[in-house]
Amino acid sequence: MATSRALTYLESRKNLTGCVCGLLGLVLTFTGVAGPYWPVVVAGLYGAGALIAPPERPTLPDFPDPSAQLDELRGDFERLGAYLADVELPPAASGRLAELTELLAALLQPGWVAEVLARDPEGVHALSRAVRQDIPEAVDAFVRTRWWHRMTPGQEPPERHLERQLALLHEEAERLAADLRETEARRQESHTRYLEDRSQ
């Protein structure tokens, strides 16, 4: 541990700047400027150099870029599809779920749509939350509640809640798609204005 710290300091900006200033002190010594106090001059210049050197900047954490996040999300979406294929849902809820997953698949499909999505961290987060949390939770809650509903009939059918949840998630995904479309429209308008300004 101590050896590692020593090696880190030897490569640090403080040490390197101090060494350069210390070499300047040796040059002053050999030219006769420092006189008999040359050790103090060399040490002082080294210390001054170490003090004025810019501080070390910690290395930034290596987070995955948005494209890599989307690749991981595509894998999770495939796993979600395999899970949903094993769940028996009522026809209405199944239809709503099919519409939702088709929209999510279109947003996650590699290509220019995914490139636009990758530049929108909030959009990536919303999509990730829908795939990894909201849809599995909605379906799993339905499966669990359906069993209890059979034991105690007369309550509100659990499929109504599931249909409403899937409708809300579909609306959220549609808003995301509309936002991405708006982003591309603004980009197109901006390019038009740029060309118009350039032609004047």
Image: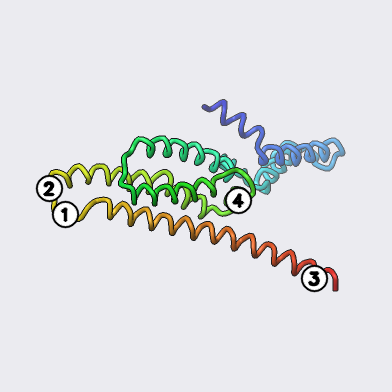
Question: Considering depth in this image, is 87 or 95 the residue closer to the camera?
Answer: 95
SS category of the residue bearing label 4: helix
Left or right? Give the position of 178 relative to 89: right
SS category of the residue bearing label 2: loop
Asked whether the viewer can see residue 143, the reply is yes
Give above or below for 188 relative to 96.
Answer: below
Between discs 4 and 1, the one toward the N terminus: 4
The residue singled out by tag 3 in the image is: 196
Residue drawn at x 22%, y 53% is 157
Q: CA gap, disc 3 to disc 1?
A: 64 Å
Residue 89 image offset from top left, x and y in percent: 31, 44
Residue drawn at x 85%, y 74% is 200
Give residue 113's mark: 4
Q: CA gap, disc 1 to disc 2?
A: 7 Å
Residue drawn at x 44%, y 51% is 99
The residue singled out by tag 1 in the image is: 155
Q: CA gap, disc 4 to disc 1?
A: 43 Å
Between discs 4 and 2, the one toward the N terminus: 4
